[in-house]
Image: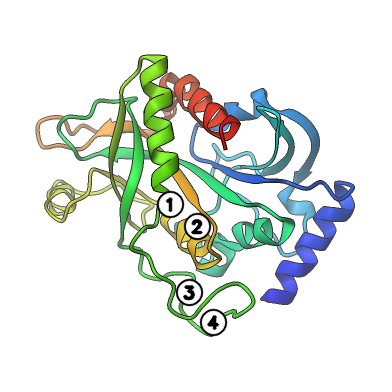
Amino acid sequence: MIQQIQESASYIQQATNAFAPEFGIILGTGLGALVNEIDIAHSLSYADIPHFPVSTVESHSGRLIFGQLAGRNVIVMQGRFHYYEGYSMDQVVFPVRVMKLLGVQKLFVSNAAGGLNPQFNTSDLMVLTDHINLQPFNPLIGKNIDELGPRFPDMSEVYDEEMVRQAMVIAEDADFDLREGVYVSVPGPMLETKAEYRYLSVIGADAVGMSTVPEVIAARHMNMPVFAVSVITDMCTPDRIKKVALADILEAAAKAEPRMTMLIKELIRVQ
């Protein structure tokens, strides 16, 4: 595994003239427009990078973007990988581990999620303050890769508290509500039943999705600070559950996308 990570990183360095990213960004479902804010220096297809998986979800472009955002060097995943696509957890988090070898110092993650907190509304943004992992596997199971991190990494402070505070200030200055909450990650790809939504709410989740937590676990294993934000694309409380199609999720994400783009851009600016 470590050899594959090194080979991918080496290929990327050669293909991008040793571009040195400070920050890594993972863009979730329907949230690819942040790329329009980037002064792009290089763009690589996942398919061209040795050992990289390839996105199979229709709303995920499958490109690695290199450039400047708010004057800082960034590497952006325009499309991520999910356990439900049939990938192993090592494949799901592979790009995050490559980012670390490329020099990325902090990771920014976005996702589309269902709202479990009755105070939330569709197209709200929620900053993650904690998570619950209900995926059937995680990327640290198996032989530990000592070159990346310790056997038993601490997860008591998963999301960087300073960046959360900075994000709240940015949102207040921009005059929009920014929620805070706990994200629960489930395997998918099917959406949850009404009973499952009740269960997830009871155990303390404010939003539910099918991604993010594996990548965050891998990042924290490598001692990489993380900031993550969910776009609430549908409401999953008992009085507001309705059948949802991918088109509905993309529409709700599109409404929130300008705020999310501004938030991440300004947060990177102040790092």
In the displayed structure, would residue 29 be above or below residue 96? above
Which three-letter amino acid code belongs to the residue tagged 2?
Glu
For the point 33% across and 56% down, the residue is 186
Give the SS element for disc 4. Answer: loop
Task: Answer with mark 1 or mark 4, whichever residue precedes in sequence.
Answer: 4
Residue at which label 1 appears: 211
Q: Is residue 135 left or right of residue 80?
A: left
Instruction: Inspect the image, locate mark 4, and give the three-letter code of the amino acid beneath it.
Output: Asn
User: Looking at the rendered structure, which numbered label has been put on residue 140?
Assistant: 3
Gap in Å between the C-alphas at discs 1 and 2?
Answer: 8 Å
The residue where tag 4 is placed is 144
Where disc 1 sits, the SS reads loop
Q: Are marks 3 and 4 in contact (CB under 8 Å)?
A: yes
Alpha carbon separation for disc pair 3 and 4: 7 Å
Task: State the CA–CA distance, disc 1 to disc 4.
Answer: 22 Å
Left/right placement of residue 65 relative to residue 13 reads left
> Is the residue under label 3 in contact with that under label 1 (CB below 8 Å)?
no
Inspect the image, locate mark 3, and give the three-letter code of the amino acid beneath it. Leu
> How crowded is the residue under tag 2: few (<14 C-alpha within 10 Å), some, or many (20+)?
many
| Residue occupying image coordinates x 66% and y 52% | 104
Residue 171 image point, x, y percent? 39, 23
Q: Position of residue 188 (x, y in %)?
A: 36, 54
Q: Which residue sits furthest top?
A: 175
Label 2 residue SS = helix
- Residue 215 is labelled as 2
Classify 10 Å Cα crowding around label 1: few (below 14), some (14-19), many (20 and above). Answer: many
Q: Is residue 56 visible?
A: no
Cα distance between the residues tagged 2 and 3: 11 Å
> How far apart are the two marked residues, 1 and 3, measured between alpha carbons?
16 Å
